[in-house]
Image (spheres, helix red, strand yellow):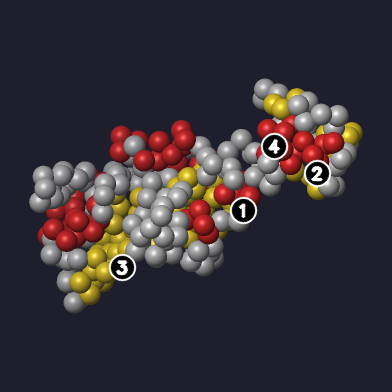
Amino acid sequence: MAQQRLDKIIASTGRYSRSEVKTLVREGRVLVDGRIAASAEDKCDPLTARISVNGEELFYREHTYVMLHKPAGVLSATEDGRGETVLDLLAPEYRKIGLFPVGRLDKDTEGLLLLTDDGALAHDLLAPKKHVDKVYFARTDGALDDADCKAFEQGITLGDGLECLPAKLEILKSDAQSEALITIREGKFHQIKRMLASRGKPVVYLKRLSMGSLTLDEGLSKGEYRLLTAEEDRKSTRLNSSHTDISRMPSSA
């Protein structure tokens, strides 16, 4: 990897600003490969150099990927004057490094939300032509049936003329209040809610379970988050390879 300035490398962790790094270097509290750094402007390879601050070794990541179990009532935005955002749930060091949510979940929707500073990955996950499956659990008022499944499979056209791509509706429970898994490949405004409302089965609860190969860690309580594991990190660069042929899905469970 190309060499980078020491202050840039350390600041990318989100734990220190560049001005703070300069102070730390002047005070002799930054080591590079076991030697006291001479200047914050010195350059090194962030992937091979061993950098420590105050005796603690730092680990460089070109990009950061955070899995969040988004709770209801929080906005999928980096900042918003109307209320608490998903970034407000993160520790200060994560709020400093330019993370943003990949796509959005409605304020009252829960579940998996990926936050990253990797714009290319975000584009791949959100572009419909990339065929990235997004799976949701939904609870609705009204009994879901085979006709609803077939309508999803064929692609629903909403009242305003918006055409939705074919999707999968897998009924888990059909009663006065029904439960289902829904798989879509796009993320239009209030899409799942509008699709089900068009069938006369309004959503009363919605939770995203997965995006591509990334599945919500159910060990995370609502509002909790963690960095992706090494395996998830490797998969994150190819999340768009995980998809199903919706046209061949069975119409119901």
The amino acid beneath tag 3 is: Tyr
> In the rendered image of this protein, does residue 43 appear above or below residue 253?
above
Residue corresponding to mark 1: 92
Q: Earlier in the sequence, mark 1 or mark 4?
A: 4
Disc 4: CA contacts within 10 A as few (<14), some (14-19) or many (>=20): some
Disc 2: CA contacts within 10 A as few (<14), some (14-19) or many (>=20): some
The secondary structure type at the circle numbered 2 is strand
Q: Is residue 17 left or right of residue 253?
A: right
Q: Position of residue 55 (x, y in %)?
A: 85, 47
Residue drawn at (59%, 45%) of the image? 96
Occupied quadrant, residue 30? top right
The amino acid beneath tag 2 is: Val
The secondary structure type at the circle numbered 3 is strand
Q: Which mark is residue 53?
A: 2
Question: In the rendered image, which quarter contains the C terminus?
Answer: bottom left
Q: Earlier in the sequence, mark 3 or mark 1?
A: 1
Q: Is residue 20 left or right of residue 29?
A: left
Q: Is residue 224 visible?
A: yes
In space, the residues marked 3 and 1 are separated at their CA atoms by: 31 Å
Residue corresponding to mark 3: 205
Task: Give the camera-side residue of 114 and 249.
Answer: 114
In space, the residues marked 3 and 4 are separated at their CA atoms by: 44 Å
In space, the residues marked 3 and 2 are separated at their CA atoms by: 46 Å
Disc 3: CA contacts within 10 A as few (<14), some (14-19) or many (>=20): some
Q: Earlier in the sequence, mark 2 or mark 4?
A: 4
The amino acid beneath tag 1 is: Pro
The amino acid beneath tag 4 is: Arg
Q: Earlier in the sequence, mark 1 or mark 2?
A: 2
In space, the residues marked 1 and 2 are separated at their CA atoms by: 18 Å
> In the rendered image of this protein, does residue 48 appear above or below residue 164?
above
